[in-house]
Image: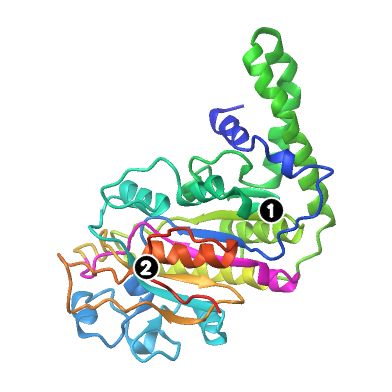
Amino acid sequence: MNRREFLSMLAVQGLAIRFGLDAAPSSSSKKKTLILLELKGGNDGLNTVIPVHNKNYQTLRPSLGLQASETLDIGEKSLHLHPSLKNFAKLYKKGDLAIVQGLGYPEPNRSHFRSIDIWETASDSDEYLDQGWMARLLENQKNQFEGYDLDGLVLGNDDLGPLLGHYDSTLILANPERFLKQAGRVRKRKKEFSKGNPALAHIYKVKEELMLAAQDLQDRMKTAPKIPVNFPKGQHGKGAEMVSKLLASGLRPAVMKITLGGFDTHSNQLKKHANLLKILDESISSLYEALHAVGIAQDVVIASYSEFGRRVKENGSKGTDHGTAAPHFVLATGVNGGLHGKTPNLEDLERGDLKFTTHFRSYYQALASECFDLKAFPSTSETLNLFS
């Protein structure tokens, strides 16, 4: 067992207490699962939600700027979507997709590590917190999360993100098969560690509960309804299918975190970004279609975030460097589809960057209110009318 596998198992301590063989059906029908989608690396918002008629956009991006005829008209006079976002455009016109514009924070930091830390802990730019914003909610307002099978589920890697610092009833899961194999290793090695190391023997005794949870997960997935959706090929298509199967099996986490990486597009951005947005569009729209197919779309909200956007002016390598504010997507049956927040002004830049128009804490507040019926940030005065 390597270190990553061991840490992944430590992160599920207490899971089987709420998610085991004899667990009662979830009672969280009035609350929703929030799927947080990290666009890792800093997505270029200006080439995602595109001000196609803006002169500064075209002037500052001579090779990256897209023309109106190349993009997807979504019925907004000044903004089009990238041509790779065909399914998102349909969902936007249907009213199931909201775009929150200009998300950011004061005194922005352009370091990947520091800025994602700010976004995931919901700190100020000069404040350092050791817990993610969702971890704090889960621990400080426990009563609001009764009825969920588990608090958090992290898929595809071991980066807890907004769940950082919350290890009780949080599961790190690359895929169900790996989870079952890890549980099996605990069983096989228990006696080996028990002989000479009482401390490890105690840990592995606790982890016996993990095996019960693993068996229950396997049983649930075997009896889950079939999903009549053609998922895209590749890692992220498989990831979308896995999320769909887990939720279709009846598993109800409060928060799920998934990641799509590769958005740090410093060079030759045009094709790279088009491919990334195609993956985003196809994987997330197939997930949403699957949720509808099994009748649980009304119980799920999907929301994107990223550490920052990109600079307005392209660089000398036909790419873009680290910037500040950017738009993000919210996909849900109960969302107030359309544009939210104010479009950043390309004629009023700060050191070549967009000035944010909507604080990300207001964004998180709207998500927490809809999914968990709580106020995540009492001091936040700005209101986003994201949900009806």
Residue drawn at x 53%, y 76% is: 387
Residue assigned mark 1: 148
As shown in the figure, which amino acid type bears the numbered disc 2? Ser
**How many residues crowd around disc 1 within 10 Å: few (fewer than 14), some, or many (20 or more)?**
many
Q: Is residue 388 left or right of residue 263?
A: right
- Residue 302 magenta-drawn? yes
Q: Is residue 205 left or right of residue 125?
A: right
Q: Position of residue 172 (x, y in %)?
A: 60, 43
Pointer 2 or 1: first along the chain: 1
- Disc 1 on helix, strand or loop? loop
Q: Position of residue 167 (x, y in %)?
A: 57, 38
Give the number of the disc on residue 311.
none
Q: Quadrant of residue 83?
A: bottom left
Residue 256: tell me if it is visible: yes
Residue assigned mark 2: 381
Q: Position of residue 179 (x, y in %)?
A: 68, 40
- Residue 81 magenta-drawn? no
Residue 230: tell me if it is visible: no
56 over 176 or under it: above or below: below
> What span is in magenta?
291-314
Residue drawn at x 64%, y 42% is: 169
Residue in the foreground of this view, choosing between 221 and 273: 221
